[in-house]
Amino acid sequence: MRAPLLTVGALLTILALEGCEGCNDNQVAPKTDEAPAFTNDVGSWLSMAVTPEGKPAIAYYDRTMGALGYAVGTIDKDGQVSWAREEVDSYPDENGLNPGDAGRYASMKITASGQVWIAYQDVGNGTLKYAHKGDGVWDVGVADIGGGAKSDAGYWASLALDASDNPVVAHFDKGKGNLRVARWSGSAFAGAVVAEGEPRTPDTGGTEIPAAVGEYANLVIGSDGTEYIAYYDRAQGSLMLASGKGGTFDTEVVDASGDVGQWPAMLLDGGDLWIAYQDVANQDLRMAHGGSGGWSTELVDSGDHIGADAALFVDGGKTGMVYFDGFQNDMKLARNTGDAWTAEKLTGDQGALGFHNETVKIGDVRYVACYDFTARSVFFAALP
């Protein structure tokens, strides 16, 4: 049964304080009572995972409050979903004081033991932050400040868990134009540069394009501990891949055919990598498939403003993805039939949907979520 459109409503309060690099700011046990519904603009930059109990969980940016929220859903036998909600960072305190603006670029993973890790940007301070929930409390702190003279990092945060369930976060340091990774050591995060770019003067002349590598970073970690980061090199207009272990990375060009590589979504299936990404020049959705034999690329869907915010999955041995149709403001679904890609519209009449798409599988049902720009809330449904 298709789950209904849902609005993530009012949340529970946790005090968030300013922090120092690598330290915890605050530990507060969240309330357990259900808060009444509210009308905040919530759901942008959402990230979705599944709890050990098999429930969907969403971390998201509350645009009204400039804050990070978290919600866990309970799906009943009729497909109806109710949410338990918590305020995580940058909500007003008991005196009504707002500590700042944080929560964009949220990326979340949940361990098998139920510990929640969220990486996100502190917009006001230009840093990468983290929130960790273990034993019923949230710890909030700074994960990386970047390498610029003034912190301007935390863009496109992408969090993955290593074999020990320690979080690793790739992000873009706009202040230096570099791709960085921050790693949890057990007590703190430490950040380091993964890749640096070079500026480029267009072949037709004109203004030099500044170095900027690491936008749209997407990180996955293989079972052997290899870390893979797909990212966009803006100056070169290329889709890039960094891979390595122990903090040492090699970088390679995946696709450099024009201006390509924004919004990469990556999936590791066995020993093969699949990367969905946007052809920026043509506004199309493309797929790169790579392994030990190199890379092959193909067109998945074409049109006007196609291919942003893709989320990849494998069901029944077949690769699929949900993504954004920016011309129609819809969420679309593409599946690989083995010989070709088929694409269909998932939403349409409900409003402007398809922003910040996510997908998880619970039992035999695959669910999708996105930001509903019209309702300024979260859309959550089962795939048909």
Image: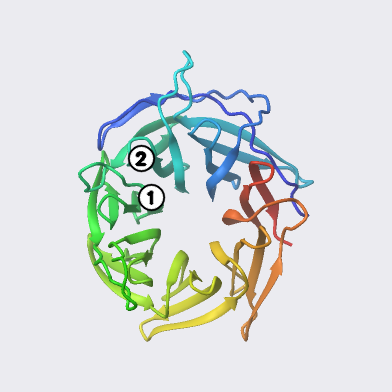
Q: In this view, does 23 lie above or below 146?
A: above
Look at the numbered disc 1 and give the secondary structure of its residue.
Answer: strand
Residue 382 to residue 199: above or below: above
Q: Of marks 1 and 2, which one's residue comes earlier in the chain?
A: 2
Q: Which amino acid does label 1 sit on?
A: Tyr
- Residue type marked 2: Lys
Residue 67's disc number: none
How many numbered marks are there?
A: 2
Residue marked by disc 2: 129
Within 10 angstroms of label 2, few (less than 14), some, or many (20 or more) residues? many
Is residue 146 shown to the viewer in this render?
yes
The C terminus - image quarter: bottom right
Q: Say which residue appears at 34% left-offset and 77% top-offset.
A: 204
Is mark 1 in CB contact (under 8 Å) with mark 2?
A: no
Which residue corresponds to the image point at 74% horizontal and 50% vertical from the top-left?
3
Question: 3 or 298: which is nearer to us?
Answer: 298
Quarter of the image holding residue 252? bottom left
Circle 1 crowding by C-alpha within 10 Å: few under 14, some 14–19, many from 20: many
Determine which residue is flagged by label 1.
155
Asked if residue 75 is positioned above or below residue 353 in the image, the reply reads above
Residue 40 image position (x, y, % from top left) = 61, 32
Which type of secondary structure does the marked residue at label 2 adopt? strand
The residue drawn where x is 62% and y is 86% is 339
The one of 203 and 233 positioned closer to us in this rendering: 203
x then y, percent, for residue 161:
38, 53
Residue 51 visible somewhere in the drawing: no
Q: Which residue lies furthest to the front in this view?
A: 206
Q: Where is residue 197 in the image (x, y as percent from the top left)?
A: 25, 65
